[in-house]
Amino acid sequence: MRDIMNEDDYFMNLTDRERAIFEGGISMGALFHQFVGTPVSIDTISSLEKAIEESILLQPAIVDVNVKLDKQLIEKSSGVMGYTSLTGEMLLIKLTTKINDKSVTTCISYDEDLQYPIMYIED
């Protein structure tokens, strides 16, 4: 039995770019499934954006995160109690992962044609 696991034991079959894409995809999936359904109001948008950014920055290889929530959609969706639940339609997120000298930008945005919050590699 080995005492210490080296990350190369798990990722030696990937290029640095592939690993950066992998880390971005894992982080996007975690973010989406962790935060969709969170109660949000027009007054809590900025604190939720910041909480999402700070939590995702803790994950491996993440060097930058930018979260924007659709204020108009949140306001429109808010009921008589003054809040709504966060949905995939409300997300506009970009995060950058870096492995050695390879950086990748991964995004989530709502695609009107697909009627779906799509995750994709921007760069």
Image (cartoon, helix red, strand yellow):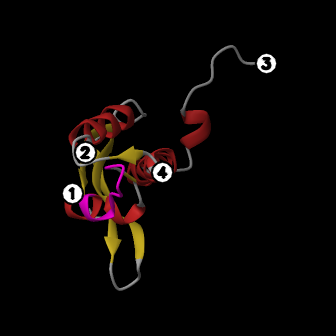
Residue 71 on image: x %, y %: 21, 57
The chief SS type of the magenta part is loop
Which mark is drawn over residue 1?
A: 3
**Numbered disc 4: secondary structure:** loop
**Distance between the Cα atoms at labels 3 and 4?**
42 Å
Q: Residues within 10 Å of mark 1 (few under 14, many from 20)?
A: some
Amino acid identity at mark 4 = Gly
Q: On residue 37, which mark appears?
A: 4
Q: Earlier in the sequence, mark 1 or mark 4?
A: 4
Secondary structure beneath label 1: helix
Q: Which residue is mark 2?
A: 45
User: Is residue 116 visible to us here?
Assistant: yes
Structural distance between the alpha carbons of marks 2 and 4: 14 Å
Marked residue nearer the N-terminal end (3 or 4): 3
The quarter of the picture where the C terminus appears is bottom left
> Residue 77 colored magenta?
yes
User: In the displayed structure, does residue 121 sit left or right of residue 5?
Assistant: left
- Pointers 2 and 1 in contact (CB under 8 A)? yes
Instruction: Report the residue at 38% width, 33% height from top.
Output: 55
- Residue 31 position, x and y percent, is 44, 46
Q: Are marks 1 and 4 in contact (CB under 8 Å)?
A: no
